[in-house]
Amino acid sequence: MKRTLQECRIRGVKTNIPFLLNVLSHPVFETGIVTTSFIDENPDLKKTSTSTWDFASEEQADPRKLFATERLVRYIANLAVNGHPAELGADASKIEKPSTGYVAPPKILGEAANNSGEGGMRHILLEKGPEEYSKFVREHKGLLVTDTTWRDAHQSLFATRVRTQELLKCAEFTNIALANAFSMEMWGGATFDVAMRFLHECPWERLEKLRVLVPDVPFQMLLRGANAVGYTNYPDNVVYKFCDQAHKSGIDVFRVFDSLNYIENLKLGVDAAGKSGGFVEGAMSYTGDVADPNKGKYSLEYYLNLAGELVEMGVHSLAIKDMAGVF
């Protein structure tokens, strides 16, 4: 237990971990002979800011040193990406930018080098339209894949910090590797605001540049219904215009979801994406256990009804969005 608490890292909020370590490390507690008044009789247990423990790691033994290395690395990484802040008096003209090194893009070898731009699932979608593409997918006998590396993968693992320049280096290879994929989710969600707020990039330029280098794979985005790619409800005309421009800039498939499965929010997103000319995938946010009839509201009947409502809206496909990993 002590080792687990030693190695536990929770960022952004204060925890009672130092207090628990004080309790577990107390010599009286270690004997196993304590009463319910143990904490009252040892008020020093609550003095966590000056606590130290007999651990092999000096950093873990002193709470004041926890995260010290990480804070330093984060500071250096921020300077490498965003430069020295001018508001603190830094003169960009006098600061030598750190070298990021050169990482060569992957080489496309053999027969694959000559196949780019000649096939891929996207050509079926462009030639036949969303309705026929939907029919093609349903009649397809094999497994079709949606790759999320360029969107959900680095949003979940790297706080959406992968930059456009890194994606561009592997774009041509990705176009060949995923030419037979149903789609590649690479835009929307948090990628839009993070690009502007933290990476100081234009999300529209990212989409358009990658579209040029990846002509064969349908690009997919995550649309938060009436919230588009933001964190509040936007006027209807804003959502319609956003989807129209997204489709023109290169998005083929719109995965529309609402975290609470709120039909009105979903309907606006589905209508806007459909009017833009894109392929609309209606997503159902899944929770609970449909095999257990005692789980209350979120029963099998609930999801069947929700699926039926999405179909009536005119979606081209359905998705089960299992964010909690319980399905």
Image: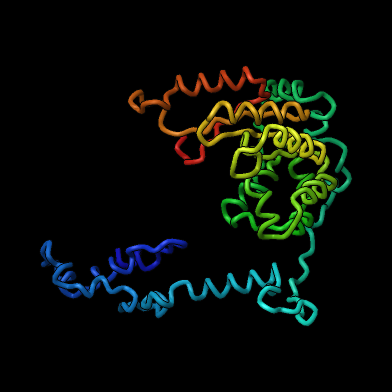
Q: Is residue 233 left or right of residue 273?
A: left
Residue at 62% across, 26% down: 267
Asked which quadrant contains residue 121, the reply is: top right
In the image, 93 versus 294, the foreground residue is 93
Q: Residue at the bottom extreme?
A: 94
Q: Is residue 188 left or right of residue 284?
A: right
Asked which quadrant contains residue 28, the reply is: bottom left
Relative image position of residue 131 (x, y in whole percent) = 75, 21
Is residue 110 in view from this perspective? yes
For residue 116, above or below residue 240: below
Quarter of the image where the N terminus is located:
bottom left
In the image, 265 versus 164, the foreground residue is 265
Residue at 47% across, 41% down: 324
Relative image position of residue 15 (x, y in whole percent) = 36, 62
Q: Is residue 253 left or right of residue 27?
A: right
Residue at 69% across, 71% down: 80
For residue 12, above or below residue 77: above
